[in-house]
Image (cartoon, rainbow, N blue to C red):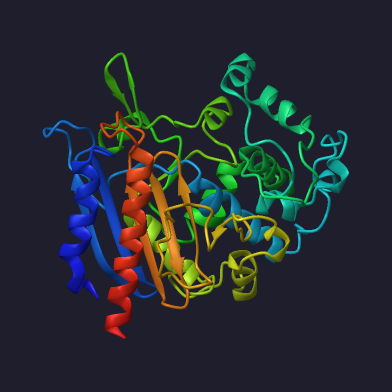
Amino acid sequence: MCGDSTRYDSIVLSGIRQGAYPGAVLVIGRRDGIVYEKGYGHLTWSPSAPADRPDSTLFDLASLTKAVATTTAAMILVDRGKLKLDEPVATYLPEFNGKGTAAITVRMLLTHTSGLRGDLPVPELKALPDGAALLRTVLAETPRTAPGSRVVYSDLNFVLVGEIIHRLSGEPLDQFVTSEVINPLGLAQTRYRPPSQLARRTAPTGLWHGHPVAAVVNDPTAAKAGGVSGNAGLFSTGEDLARFAQFLLRGGTCPDGRPLVSQATVRLFTTRSPQADVGPDHRALGWQAVPTDEEVSSAGTLFGPRSFGHTGWTGTSLWIDPDRDLFVILLTNRAFAPRARKPFTVLKTVRGRLADAAARESDRAR
């Protein structure tokens, strides 16, 4: 399958040449191994900056946190019988009791059909003193559209899912994710709130007085929450995310063969949800499904109908085609000082072209 490597290189490097991102990591693989991985460019636009590496460069995953950390934690609690998808959110969070919230279920949070608004505006976030005030504000939210009537992608949904996990597990979200997901899967580089000494190998996502900002969460909601939130906050490497993708392709088993969650639960969460078929943006539980609501799909045009994935605002993405036994991970820091006029459009094109190239190569190798 790696025969198309020059094709992959030209696609990723085209994004750098167009100024969408200074560096990237690409990992393509199957449940039992990596078929192609490579780092491109540098952590910043300076050629003297460290080169991107699949094994060690940390990326702020942004909203990919929703799928990798928060959704997987929810899968574990569903598997253990502690979390019921069709229970009202108020069953687990009694303070979530505003007008119209009684109709909102956990499933609606995971499929972004709750009717809650997408996020809190930055001025509103800045006015909040701390994470506790943030949580109180989100718990006081009420739906802006009828629950179940449409898909509205919302960070607030996953702030609430993260709090449900905290209360059901009796542990802070980051501790539960670390002990129940990160450690069993051997994701040694993956963490919330990376220490400052890791900044030198973390892809920066912004500038402060002309200096790159790295190892500090970019998402404003997660930042207000202290770096740990259900919607964002996780940092990881390409190789760690490959191990995570392989866990899903194996049907929920750890590298040593022990089940972390049942195959049925993996299938439940990664299958396109009929309850979310209320618009062009199709959803599984915590994951995006195909077809995506994009003019140029991040999943390309060839990934199969059971494919699922997620992206992050900082420039991260993971797409999985279970029928092909194939995953494609592209990690960039397109949020860092892009030189392209429309860096996000360029990045989506790169993602889609990579997915199609990987699918074609996989089909030729069969």
Q: Residue 67: percent from the left, percent from the top?
A: 54, 53
Observer able to see residue 254: no
- Name the residue at the bottom extreme: 366
- In screen coordinates, is 193 left or right of 237? right
Q: Is residue 234 left or right of residue 172?
A: left
Residue 172 quadrant: top right
Q: Residue 266, image x and y in percent?
A: 59, 69
User: How many numbered marks appear?
Assistant: 0
Determine which quarter of the picture holds residue 319: bottom left
Q: Is residue 212 visible?
A: yes
Q: Is residue 76 above or below residue 362?
A: above
Which quadrant would the N terminus be assigned to in this image? bottom left
* Horizontal arrangement in the rendering, residue 35 relative to residue 279 (left or right): left
Q: Is residue 174 above or below residue 330?
A: above
Q: Nearer the viewer, residue 3 or 78?
A: 3
Q: Residue at x 49, y 38 (%)?
A: 233
| Front-most of residues 290 and 341 | 341
